[in-house]
Amino acid sequence: MPSANALDLPPIGHRHTAGDHPLYLHRAGTGEPAVVFLPGGGMFGLGYFNVHMRVAEFTTSVVYDRAGTGWSDAVSFPRSAEDVVQELRELLRVAGLSGPYLLVGHSLGGLYARRFA
């Protein structure tokens, strides 16, 4: 029986165009602040799915794939932190998620969270 590659399966969540790239975003829960998970380098949003769903029990929780990762479109590298942050700002806007935000960054995602702030 052949096994399916995770990226061959349809994603949960939605793709939104932010800047020049369609980016994947999954939103769960309601309330403020919106908790936004920023994965580390080489990671993708659904790597945080279990904690994301636990956070969604008491407020809005968001996981996403940066351009070039997960279900988001491929991009050319190198990319600046400012490129990544502006795409995230636009992604949150087009997805209808207004602040305040609580940014949860892992590794490289922590640097992007700091730049975003």
Image (tube, rainbow, N blue to C red):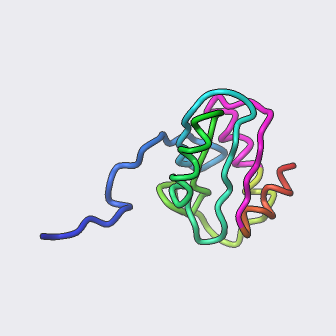
> x%, y% of residue 73?
51, 56
Q: How many labels does the image show?
A: 0
Query: 73 or 8: nearer the eye?
Result: 8
Query: 65 or 55: nearer the eye?
Result: 55
Relative to 98, does residue 116 appear above or below in the rendering?
below
Instruction: Examine the structure image and report whether residue 31 is included in the region drawn in magenta.
Output: no
Residue 116 falls left or right of residue 49: right
Instruction: Examine the structure image and report whether residue 96 is included in the region drawn in magenta.
Output: yes
Relative to 54, does residue 79 appear above or below in the rendering?
below
Relative to 29, does residue 114 appear above or below in the rendering?
below
> x%, y% of residue 90?
70, 40
Magenta part of the chain = 86-106
Residue 103 falls left or right of residue 97: right
Residue 2 falls left or right of residue 51: left
> x%, y% of residue 54?
56, 44
Q: Which residue is drawn at 53% across and 42% down?
A: 26
Q: Quadrant of residue 81?
A: bottom right
Q: Which residue is drawn at 62% across and 48% down?
A: 20
> x%, y% of residue 116?
83, 51
Query: 66 or 108: nearer the eye?
Result: 108
